[in-house]
Amino acid sequence: MNTSLDQSPCRALRGVGPKLAALLAKRNIHTLQDILFHLPSRYLDRTHLTALSDLRAGDYVAIEGVIAHHRVSHGAKGSLTCELQDSRGYINLKFFHFNSEQIRHLNVGTKLRCFGEVRQSYQGLEIVHPEYLHLTPGKTLEIDDHLTPIYPSTEGVTQFQWRRLTDQVLALLAEGAILSDHLYTAQDRFSLPSLIEALHYVHRPPPDANREQLLAGIHPMQQRLALEELLAHHLGLMRLRASVQKTTAPVLSGSDTLSDAFLSQLSFALTSAQQRVLREIRTDIERPEPMLRLLQGDVGSGKTVVAALSLLQAVASGYQGALMAPTEILAEQHYLNLSKWLEPLGLKVAWLSGKVKAKARLQTLEEIKTGAAHIAVGTHALFQEAVQFNHLALLVIDEQHRFGVDQRLALKEKGAKAETHPHQLMMTATPIPRTLAMSVYAHLDHSIIDELPPGRKPIQTIVLPNDKRDKIMARVNEQCVSGKQAYWICPLIEDSEKLQCEAASRTYQQLSVQLPHLKCGLVHGALNVQDKAAIMHAFKKGEIDLLVATTVVEVGVDVPNASLMIIENAERMGLSQLHQLRGRVGRGSAESFCVLMYQAPLSDTAYERLNIMRTTENGFAIAEKDLELRGSGEFLGTRQTGIGQLRVASYTRDSALLPIVKELAQSLLNTDVSDALITRWLPDGLAYGQV
């Protein structure tokens, strides 16, 4: 058998016709090798039968029994219910989607073997839509001799089909089909199992497999595959870095006249950390290859000033700069700051968002195109087709992980001119854990502003249950009456901006009644940009005492007089988001407080989140914990296509493999093995890493 799995199409398998092939292609599965590397996300144990009397809600079980009762209910939501009994107990099997044939075959006296998740209902324990097989009287049906893999799927492809496909490919492998083991030479050195051995084990774990290790993803066979996957990603990033360094960028070595004038008008001096980061950026942009630099800085550390000085260097060198932010509020905050700082220097700052309309928009587009606008600030509207730059030399992207790959690429390409590309400075107020910096962001240079401006006092964080609401309102009243201001953040009920707005509106009405002598304001995502700007401006001027808001104020809002932050239902939010919200206070010299309200009872994970918020303000410690609790995919955000979407590896769990990954990558970078690994594990190529 000389079949090469990476060359053979899925259509070569039994049961794969045009329709199934098209469904597989949706998951970038085109070859037999792709099927083999479509790995299980979890396992179910069907290697033994569970007595019906031993069932517990939440268990996935294999059971056998005889149907004792059978009933069909009609109405808006019809159902078929079969009561399954054995000698010691019973359970209901419930079907909401069924046909006349099922009704006929699932009748009283029929013996079944079933598998599914046990749930608790008002009628007792039940399994909804179990998998089932009819048992013929007098014949014994073998039980599975391995844990049952569950594969990530797409609509239209069942778990049975995934198992049938992998069975066929594993059989071909056993018959001698060709599958290259690219780490063969490293097996002895790092005590690795072979690739074929690892794939067989992971797809079809034997009955005696260490289930705890498999479920945790730490079995040696899984680790062998995780090492290869992490290596492929690292090689991809190294290739990306090398390809960027082959292009050219404008040399930004203009005079310091604008920068000196800018610094002289500031009411504060730069911190030593800001000065160090500016030197790192300047060294990059004075070179003829594009800068790729990630600037990390905790909330309130002064990243915007660093961005402004970097953009001034582009303008001083005869080029344009652009700053893009993911939300209207954050983008507008940047626009207002840059306008205030740079227009006195004779510079034109253009503002472009989706809500800039008609005549004003056309005028702004013309200013950007002709170069009359030295710096353009906006949301995703900046990368739309109608926007043409005169010569963009520096692109600053704030909270870059919130933008999709295509959006970042589109804006980068707008700066491409005469075979040059713009320098790129990506900023984030979410500290990147060291593990991710070594892996996901390995293609970027890193700068960190690890020093807050002098005079900042620690924020005292208090955790209180929701039933202390009256006490919290008294604290809000006390702070506002004394001349300070406060935020009241409404809960993230679910991923719905509409529901957040409704919750914020209700809370605003309640607080306006309960604290009638305070001037309350309301801001949320449904307001138009002018109304949002007016409310935020009034809050910043001190005309509003208490601002009720959704999480739209998470980043970019700077009101030094605000000294109290109330966050409702804080247990529902991630650590990074809580840290960002807390960073809206403590920006002045007054003592500041953050109250995290929660609805009891708390889960263990929610308790951990709130406790770390109470005990530290260290953004990196919080980020590490957030990564541990939520995983890299959620930490990075779903818009970050490709990054964090690992099949078997985990950046946190498998961090011990990273030194081996880096060592192997250095020796494999410019080899055919590098190409093969990237093709195997990254079907979309390097697009996910483009910046």
Image: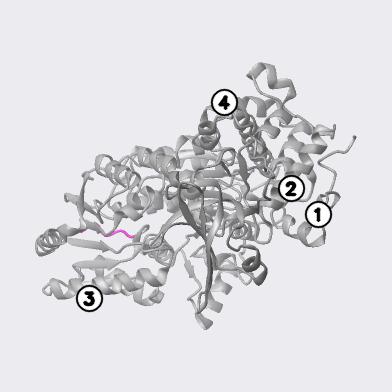
Residue 144 higher or lower than 656, as above or below: below
Q: Secondary structure at mark 4?
A: helix
For marks 1 and 4, give the CA distance.
43 Å
Mark nearer the N terminus (1 vs 3): 1
Does the CB distance between marks 1 and 2 fall below 8 Å?
yes
Region in magenta:
557-562
- Name the amino acid type tagged 3: Gln
Q: In the image, which disc is placed on residue 293? A: none
Does the CB distance between marks 4 and 3 fall below 8 Å?
no
- Crowdedness of circle 2 by 10 Å Cα count: few (<14), some, many (20+)? some
For marks 4 and 2, give the CA distance.
37 Å
For marks 4 and 3, give the CA distance.
56 Å
- Name the amino acid type tagged 4: Pro
Q: In this rendering, does residue 305 appear at all?
A: yes
Residue at the image position 50 percent from the left and 34 percent from the top: 653
- Disc 1 versus disc 3: nearer the observer: 1
Whether the magenta-drawn stretch holds residue 128 is answered as no
Outermost residue, right side: 2
Residue at the image position 33 percent from the left and 65 percent from the top: 550
Residue at the image position 50 percent from the left and 33 percent from the top: 212
Mark nearer the N terminus (4 vs 3): 3
Q: Which residue is mark 1?
A: 15
Q: In the image, which disc is placed on residue 164? A: 2
Residue 332 higher or lower than 619, as above or below: below
Residue 655 higher or lower than 508, as above or below: above
Q: Which residue is mark 3?
A: 509
- Name the amino acid type tagged 1: Gly
585 or 35: nearer the eye? 35
For marks 2 and 3, give the CA distance.
58 Å
